Amino acid sequence: MKIIYVHQYFKTPQEGGAIRSYYLAKGLVDNGFEVEMVTTHNEPSYRHVVIEGIKVHYLPVPYDNSMGFVKRVLAYMGFVRKAKRRIRKIKNADIVYATSTPLTVGLVALWAKKKLRLPYYFEVRDLWPTAPIEVGAVKGAIFKKWLYGLEAKIYRKAEKIIALSPGMRDWIKKVVPKKEVYMIPNMADCVFFNKEIKDPKLVDFYHASQPFVITYLGSIGMSNHLEFFLDIAQESKKQGLNINFKIVGTGSQVSRIKMLSYMKKLQNVEFFPHQNKEGVKDILNVTDATYVCFANLPVLATNSPNKLFDSLASGKLTIVNTPGWTKDLVENHQCGFYANPLDPTIFIEKVRPFLEQRELLELYKNNARTTAEKHYSRKLQIEKLVKIFNNEQRLKVSDSEVYILTA
């Protein structure tokens, strides 16, 4: 089977960021499928390369997280136009695998089904348009209505739908009750990451000599609302706790969050730029706990954040601030905790036992690694996708994860 994999923001481990598509595509290639990836880059011209057996088509569509709404929309639609032209040139394809975000990737899939008679699977990485609407990035009743209509049409026309979390799955089932919805969460790379003893050289390099380090890894945008992380750091400082807070990443809100940290005089907070996978591994080495941060919006509780799974694979105490499925995950497996972001004193109460009882911290760290291996390993997620393409009708259903819902 030849698969056209459409992902506007495909990344490799060397680039860092969200590399789910890299591993899924490579896993498909390793299992005998032919995969051509259609994506973008910020260079001025088209080029194609073969990466680990994946033929990658890089289309020249500039994009940056700091872009405003209009420029983002232009980038989305520019990709749609260029992707259509490129896909026309790909011969003997059997199916399209389109992954959002943005939702406009679905326009490419709809076009391929209508014009080229190619069926498509649609992977939902974030709930669009609900997420940008709740964040306030999308306004106007008519535009919202059109986007919701587009979402429903993309789901209806898809052969199969892949969701990244139970919350996403439940939302999709409300929109298209009769559709087959599979659940494949983001993956824990238990081969690359491991539970390690802190490296003294890395401790020195990352200024992590404090006995307890809490790290945020990921995008720094409106939906992440890192003000919550700063509130925790401020309360920690107020109560005299010897905790160092690190913020690692980039995004549209970096300058503002840095300014807020400066104005709050948070000497216990340090910023680092976006890291590739090796850099993430190094920073996790000196980290005791990670903090998964989102704005206090219902739709964001459905997210399946990449760095949560890096945290589990690295054997870190994993802290979340949304009351959705990730809360259930860390609590049920005793590998972290949930703290209401609106009250930073709750966070302090919950983290204090781990500061005072190192054996408790080690227990939770070991549980994190075990959870990653048993439930979210890269191998397991790839196997699920391969089964979907091989027309498996039903995957294992367990108490902790529902992999497939049938109509």
Image (cartoon, rainbow, N blue to C red):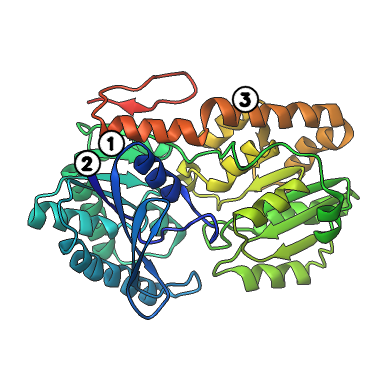
The residue at 58%/31% (across/down) is: 372
- Measured in 3D between alpha carbons, the distance from the residue under mark 1 to the one under mark 3, in whole angstroms, is 29 Å
Q: Which residue is mark 2?
A: 1
Disc 3 crowd, CA 10 A, few/some/many (<14, 14-19, 20+): some
Q: CA distance from mark 3 to mark 2?
A: 38 Å
Q: Secondary structure at mark 2?
A: loop
Badge 1 amino acid: Lys
Q: Amino acid at mark 3?
A: His
Along the line of sight, the residue nearer the viewer: 346 or 377: 377
Where does the N terminus fall, quadrant-wise?
top left
Q: Nearer the viewer, residue 343 or 138?
A: 138
Give the Cα separation between the discs numbered 2 and 1. Answer: 31 Å
* Whether residue 268 is situated above or below residue 186 in the rendered picture: below
In the image, which is nearer the foreground, mark 2 or mark 1?
Answer: 2
The dot on residue 219 is none
Q: Which residue is mark 3?
A: 333
Q: Earlier in the sequence, mark 2 or mark 1?
A: 2
Q: Is residue 38 left or right of residue 259?
A: left
Quick check: can you spot residue 228? no
Q: Secondary structure at mark 3?
A: loop
**Label at residue 174:** 1
Quadrant of the snapshot with the C terminus:
top left
Identity of the residue drawn at 55% across and 25% down: 374
Q: Secondary structure at mark 1?
A: helix
N-terminal label among 3 and 2: 2
The residue depicted at 78 percent of the width and 38 percent of the height is 351
Which of the two marks, 1 or 3, is nearer to us in this view?
3
Identify residue type, mark 2. Answer: Met
164, above or below 68, in the image: above
Q: Is there CB contact under 8 Å for labels 2 and 1? A: no
